[in-house]
Amino acid sequence: MMRKAIAAALWLGLSILGAGHAHAGEAGDAVFAERGPWSLDGKELRWTVHVEGPEQPGFLPIDNGSVTLAETIDPSDQQPVLQLTQKTDRRTRQIGPFPISGGDPVLTFFLEQTARDMAGLTGGSPFYIRNRIKDALFRGGQITQQGQQSVASFTPFADDPNGARMGGFQTLTLTFVLGDPKQPIREFRAETQGAEPGYLNRMTLQ
């Protein structure tokens, strides 16, 4: 649990620093726009989750999962905090708490799950993978308009010198479907191209 908490904190730091970061590009600024302080007014936000990939030990595909963001009270100081609840085909677990005024905890969760899946499937260093994803989100990417929505996309390993050893993950594309900058990200998608490894991690706001 401590290892997961530390990893989540690292991504949360990325979320906090991303908006307005001196080296962030337009696409990164859009993904890391300030969406806090969060005020859910007693409501929950729910994203469906679908994860698929090769059959390998330790990899957990998810056919019909969900991630729910809710506001609760921290019993230690009676202050409002955010809590994530992840449901998969096999288990339910809570992740957090996260500060009301901090970065986007759902973005944090999505990036960490993608990095952990890639590390597990390739045998690569999770630290290297996280750093390459962070670098791409800060300095790369492109943003396009699709009707009223903006779509930001990134290819963090396209020119990676270790691409030949990534088993197809060098084609990984991270896509974020965005509405109003103050609103939650509507869709998160991490997807490789081609038959191998056939990885997809998709979260869609309901």
Image (cartoon, rainbow, N blue to C red):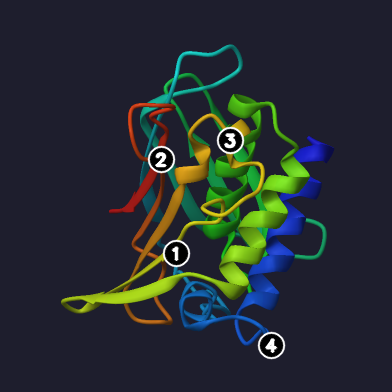
Residues at discs 2 and 1 in contact (Cβ within 8 Å): no
Q: Say which element carries label 1.
A: loop
Q: Residue at x 51, y 38 (%)?
A: 169
How crowded pointer 3 is (Cα within 10 Å; few <14, some 14-19, many 20+) is rated as: few
The type of residue carrying mark 4 is Ala
Q: Amino acid at mark 1?
A: Gly
At label 3, which amino acid type do we have? Ala
Q: Quadrant of the N terminus?
A: top right
Provide residue 22's location: percent of width, then percent of height: 69, 88
What is the spatial separation of the Cα atoms under label 4 and label 3, in whole angstroms?
32 Å
Q: Which mark is residue 22?
A: 4
The answer to whether one can see residue 93 in this image is: yes
Residue 75 is situated, as x and y percent measured from the top left of the image, at 76, 55
Q: Residue at x 52, y 43 (%)?
A: 170
Q: In this rendering, would 46 be left or right of 34?
A: left
Rendered location of residue 147, percent (x, y): 16, 77
Which residue is disc 3 drawn over? 164
Which residue lies under the disc numbered 1? 42
Find residue 116 and report its image quarter.
top right
